[in-house]
Image (spheres, coloured by chain):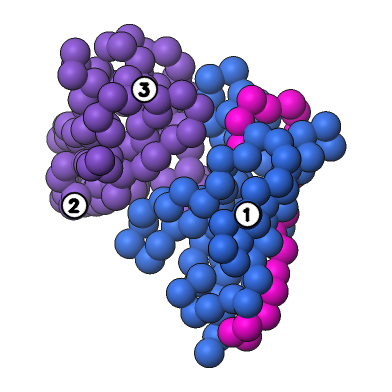
Amino acid sequence: GIQVEQSPPDLILQEGANSTLRCNFSDSVNNLQWFHQNPWGQLINLFYIPSGTKQNGRLSATTVATERYSLLYISSSQTTDSGVYFCAVERAGKSTFGDGTTLTVKP
Amino acid sequence: KAGVTQTPRYLIKTRGQQVTLSCSPISGHRSVSWYQQTPGQGLQFLFEYFSETQRNKGNFPGRFSGRQFSNSRSEMNVSTLELGDSALYLCASSSGDEQFFGPGTRLTVL
């Protein structure tokens, strides 16, 4: 099946710093989503981005489907940004998640 | 519009028992997918239902099953529970390609 690799696995930042999270996938995909999982386990939709660039406030994402990667940018990070960020890709009707990036933002 | 709801939110069972989890999708969404999340295996796809039919299936044993009703609500069942079935079970609904997740059911098997 398709492989999804996220990097870095862990990231520790000071409040106000910027960060880039990466998602590489091993084959062509139909869809790609970014999620933030809160401490209670809820997956929050960040972006649905099979290709191109999107922005939502301090967050933006870019997917280069032809090169099989996606990037999530977080600017001016806040402590509430802490949590696990997942990338999920869909191919042939099945979704595959990466192992996530655990982000800790310190005040 | 109400989000995806899952019941129960927490469940404790013992080995050998069976369990049924429920998921109500967003109104108008006809696709429901189920996922298992464990610390060791991460988030893994269980199966997807669309219009009461299983459309896709992950690599889980037959002890894991599901169904979908005419109102798109879905249930998943795990029979003969094992300790390794302890996990967060997440349900997602979709009207097209974007998935929206419920809060999950945390199952503990003792």
Residue at 31%, 11% in the rendered image? B51
Crowdedness near tag 2: few (<14), some (14–19) or many (≥20) residues, C-alpha within 10 Å: few
Residue at 44%, 57% in the rendered image? A37
Foreground mark, 2 or 1?
1
Which residue type does callout 3 highlight?
Answer: Ser
In the image, are marks 3 and 1 on the same chain? no
Residue carrying label 2: B10
Residue A86 lies left or right of residue B77; in this view the side is right
Residue carrying label 1: A55
Mark 3–mark 1 distance (CA, rounded to whole Å): 27 Å
Which range is magenta? A12-32
Helix, strand or loop status at disc 1:
strand
Q: Are marks 3 and 1 in contact (CB under 8 Å)?
A: no
Number of residue marks: 3
| Nearest to N terminus: mark 2 or mark 3 | 2
Residue at 52%, 61% in the rendered image? A84
Camera-side residue of B60 and B47: B47
Residue B92 lies left or right of residue A29; in this view the side is left
Residue at 19%, 50% in the rendered image? B9
B1 vs A46: above or below: above
- Residue A70 image point, x, y percent: 72, 46
The quarter holding residue A64 reads: top right
Helix, strand or loop status at disc 3:
strand
State the purple chain.
B
- Residue A76 image point, x, y percent: 63, 77
Which residue type does callout 2 highlight?
Answer: Tyr
Which residue type does callout 1 highlight?
Answer: Gln
Crowdedness near tag 3: few (<14), some (14–19) or many (≥20) residues, C-alpha within 10 Å: many
- Residue A38 image point, x, y percent: 40, 62
